[in-house]
């Protein structure tokens, strides 16, 4: 891994050159928050953002994604991957992308996700502002982000760019970089370590302890009913989550009743119909009918079930779910610390 430095004065030119060469997506201000969007100018980039409303996974796994167009028995893929740079991804969102990379490739290689993912150069950036509900320092601290091609850290006077892959190295051609000095690398390391001390919330136990205790609480129906008592079943906690990856597939037929398209949509396990299935005779069965059952399922997935496959929790501590929940009951820190105290 090599590392370079670019001063503040040249950074703007670096961004502008990149934007001219390739589509660049990054965090921009929108209304009262931040979103990942395609940049039209270097001035739009807000590397001082706290957290984006939706995670960057939307670029590989959009909320609504056309999969195929069909006409009778003939069909054609809708996947049209675009070479691009995704700039300014915080480390917790890189960890979330690492999870979706695994989950969309481990058994059935999901070409609809992977085609978009493989043509993207990811540049991480250090967290400059911590969001009000973040707890990324205390969740899975043993897991390192690894899916990015380079990482950018703001230090006094400029930025340190650490390259991890040839795609990361290729970024250097866009700017006036110089090799980073030992002092600049130390400064970047300190910046990234110091931010971890500024999370407003924290889990109080290790991932393994949490996984075991949350799993042991499965049968405590009263607990889950109480935790979910104010739940609206809106699914917002799922929708904003960078590690949620459930989807629903629907076919839409054109009026000719011969052609149409197949589209997949984000799904949400907290919604009432998520686990509803049709059975014989047009009847249906919902195997997570109660709010408490659905609430429990989310926490089992985030804190326990997926740990063996992922090597840690299916939560990266971004705090988006806590902020998105109108009832303010979705915060993993509150729920998990409560279970751990039982
Ligand atoms: S469960 Fe909440 S805090 Fe954890 S990754 Fe998902 S949105 Fe972020
Ligand atoms: S926990 Fe909150 S965000 Fe999630 S479904 Fe219930 S009310 Fe909506």
Image (cartoon, rainbow, N blue to C red):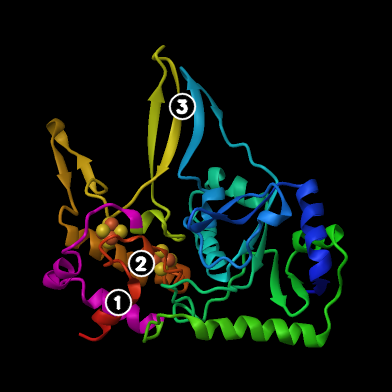
What is the magenta range?
207-236
User: Which of the two discs, 1 and 2, labels the residue nearer the N terminus?
Assistant: 2
Up-down relation of residue 76 to residue 316 (above or below): above
Answer whether residue 299 is visible to the viewer in this image: yes
Viewer-side label of 3, 1: 1
Mark 2 burial class by Cα count in 10 Å: few <14, some 14-19, many 20+: many
- The reply to whether the C-beta atoms of the residues labelled 3 and 1 are less than 8 Å apart is no
Quarter of the figure that contains the C terminus: bottom left
How crowded is the residue under tag 3: few (<14 C-alpha within 10 Å), some, or many (20+)? some
Residue under pointer 3: 261
Q: Which corner quadrant of the image does residue 185 belong to?
A: bottom right
Q: Which residue is found at the position 83% from the left and 63% from the top? A: 172
Q: CA distance from mark 3 to mark 1?
A: 42 Å
Between disc 3 and disc 1, whose residue precedes?
3
Q: Which mark is residue 151?
A: none
Asked whether mark 2 and ligand 1 are closer than 8 Å, the reply comes as yes
Alpha-carbon neighbours of circle 1 within 10 Å: few (<14), some, or many (≥20)?
some
Q: Which mark is residue 322?
A: 2
In the rendered image, residue 249 lying in the magenta stretch gets the answer: no
Please say if the residues under marks 1 and 2 sit with CB atoms less than 8 Å apart.
yes
């Amino acid at each position: 891994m090599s590392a370079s430095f670019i001063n503040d004065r040249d950074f703007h030119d670096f961004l502008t050159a990149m934007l001219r060469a390739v589509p660049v997506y990054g965090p921009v201000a929108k209304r009262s928050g931040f979103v990942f969007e395609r940049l039209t100018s270097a001035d739009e980039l807000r590397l001082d953002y706290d957290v984006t409303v939706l995670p960057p996974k939307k670029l590989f796994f959009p909320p609504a994604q056309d999969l195929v167009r069909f006409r009778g028995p003939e069909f054609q893929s809708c996947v049209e991957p675009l070479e691009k740079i995704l700039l300014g991804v915080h480390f917790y969102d890189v960890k979330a992308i690492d999870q979706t990379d695994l989950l969309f490739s481990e058994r059935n290689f999901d070409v609809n996700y992977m085609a978009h993912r493989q043509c993207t150069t990811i540049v991480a950036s250090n967290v400059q502002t911590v969001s009000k509900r973040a707890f990324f320092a205390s969740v899975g601290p043993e897991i390192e982000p690894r899916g990015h091609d380079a990482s950018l850290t703001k230090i006094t006077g400029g930025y340190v760019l650490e390259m991890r892959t040839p795609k990361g190295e290729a970024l250097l051609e866009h700017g006036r970089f110089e090799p980073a000095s030992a002092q600049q690398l130390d400064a970047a390391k300190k910046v990234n370590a110091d931010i971890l001390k500024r999370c407003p919330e924290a889990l109080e136990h290790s991932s393994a302890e949490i996984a075991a205790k949350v799993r042991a609480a499965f049968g405590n129906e009263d607990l889950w009913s109480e935790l979910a008592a104010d739940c609206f079943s809106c699914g917002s906690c799922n929708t904003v989550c960078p590690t949620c990856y459930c989807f629903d597939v629907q076919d839409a037929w054109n009026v000719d009743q011969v052609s149409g398209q197949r589209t997949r949509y984000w799904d949400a396990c907290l919604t009432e119909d998520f686990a509803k299935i049709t059975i014989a005779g047009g009847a249906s069965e919902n195997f997570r009918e109660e709010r408490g059952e659905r609430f429990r399922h989310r926490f089992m997935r985030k804190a326990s079930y997926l740990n063996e496959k992922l090597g840690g929790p299916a939560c990266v501590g971004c705090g988006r779910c806590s902020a998105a929940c109108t009832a303010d009951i979705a915060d993993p820190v509150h729920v998990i610390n409560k279970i751990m105290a039982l």
